[in-house]
Image: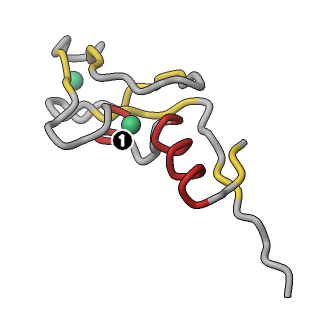
Amino acid sequence: MGRKKSIIKIPKNVFLKCPHCSKRNKAIVDIESCPQKFVCPKCNKEVNTPIAQCCVICAFSNKRCPRSLYMEARVKGLELR
Ligand SMILES: [Zn+2]
Ligand SMILES: [Zn+2]
């Protein structure tokens, strides 16, 4: 029985939801992205990665950062695109 190789897709951009004003801010993701903070353009507050979270992409968007996906792909032997 052939096992289908799972594919993990790296997002091109994400929406970071500001925890202060709930605005969703579009952010471009590059292959090495693991940003530790962003500044919300609406309320101008700086948002930092919460303790025990990987980065603001993992914490404040519904996607995960490329670095985190890359680690998972390596551990599970998945294909990354
Ligand atoms: Zn905000
Ligand atoms: Zn992350």
Amino acid beneath label 1: Cys
Residue 59 appears at what percent x and percent y?
29, 41
* Tag 1 secondary structure: helix
Q: Is residue 8 above or below residue 57?
A: below
Q: Quadrant of the C terminus?
A: top right
In the rendered view, does 40 fall on the left or right side of 20? right
Residue located at (32% from left, 32% from top): 55
Q: Quadrant of the N terminus?
A: bottom right
Residue 19 appears at what percent x and percent y?
18, 35
In the rendered view, does 25 fall on the left or right side of 10? left
Residue 63 appears at what percent x and percent y?
46, 45
Closer-to-camera residue (62/55): 55
Residue located at (18% from left, 43% from top): 52
Write down which quadrant ligand 2 falls in.
top left
Mark 1 is surrounded, within 10 Å at the Cα level, by few (under 14), some (14 to 19) or many (20 or more) other residues, namely some
Name the residue carrying label 1. Answer: 58
Q: Is residue 14 above or below residue 47?
A: below
Does label 1 point to a residue whose CB lies under 8 Å from ligand 2? yes
Closer-to-camera residue (67/38): 67
- Name the image quarter holding residue 30: top right
Residue located at (30% from left, 13% from top): 41
Residue located at (62% from left, 31% from top): 12
Closer-to-camera residue (65/42): 65
**How many numbered dots are placed on residues in this image?**
1
Residue 68 appears at what percent x and percent y?
46, 42
